[in-house]
Image: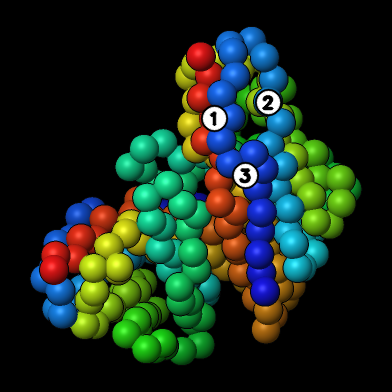
Amino acid sequence: GAVVSQHPSWVICKSGTSVKIECRSLDFQATTMFWYRQFPKQSLMLMATSNEGSKATYEQGVEKDKFLINHASLTLSTLTVTSAHPEDSSFYICSARRTRQGVYEQYFGPGTRLTVT
Amino acid sequence: GENVEQHPSTLSVQEGDSAVIKCTYSDSASNYFPWYKQELGKRPQLIIDIRSNVGEKKDQRIAVTLNKTAKHFSLHITETQPEDSAVYFCAASWAYGGSQGNLIFGKGTKLSVKP
């Protein structure tokens, strides 16, 4: 149990275009999902918290108009990188939260490697 | 807010030896401490977690200890194997009454197990 999928696993796009990344919890419902960015050899940087049916909460310094998040159902959240630029190239990882024994646990998707040329 | 410090940043051990990674946290309200293992280019995998109502938890070769007074917790891997080589992240959060704060991650420890 607790499987999270992410699609696509990698994408190359041209500067100025938009890219959508999907995150799905396959065997549990996730009212809350998270989007992280990870630079090489660095830790996970939380970008935003996505709550089903409401607006996402963005961390300080993350542009909400550039990184659009939609959490349309209990099993799907999407991240759209709008007008992508080379500096947006990174590894994006989503995670979904489920409750077990009264405490939330987070499970991560496999990540999406974005390269903007 | 919560701050999690993790040490060491890199750790190299011989196969069969033990490895210990330590984390400290700042928020005394934190009561949930998971550990994740991330292999190169892959997702972080939850390998073990501990809640503040226990001091130690074991799962085969992996154990985690928690000292609430000192606000630190540690990951212990015994009889290390080459496949244990990865980056390990500790994290901390609080969870009370159906609500939970966001996980705050340490910066990671790159463990290398030499055959």
Q: Which amino acid type is marked by label 3?
A: Trp
Image coordinates of residue B86 in percent, x first then y, are: 32, 59
Q: Is B39 left or right of B28, judged from the image as shown?
A: left
**Residue beneath label 3, please?**
A35
Q: CA distance from mark 1 to mark 2?
A: 9 Å
Return the mark for residue B62.
Answer: none
Amino acid type for the residue under numbered disc 2: Val
Q: Residues within 10 Å of mark 2 (few under 14, many from 20)?
A: some
Residue placed most toward the observer, B90 or B66: B90
Residue furthest to the top: A16
Q: Which residue is mark 1?
A: A114
- Above or below A22: residue B33: below
Name the image quarter holding residue A55.
Answer: top right
Tell me what residue is drawn at x 22 percent, y 76 percent: B80
Q: Is residue A49 above or below residue A64?
A: below
Say whether disc 3 or disc 1 marks the residue closer to the N-terminus: 3
Residue plotted at (21% across, 82% down): B79
Local crowd at mark 3 within 10 Å, few (<14), some, or many (≥20)?
many
**Residue A80 falls left or right of residue B34:** right
| Secondary structure found at label 3 | strand
User: Which numbered marker is on residue A19?
Assistant: 2
Q: Chain of mark 1?
A: A
State which mark lies toward you, 2 or 3.
Answer: 2
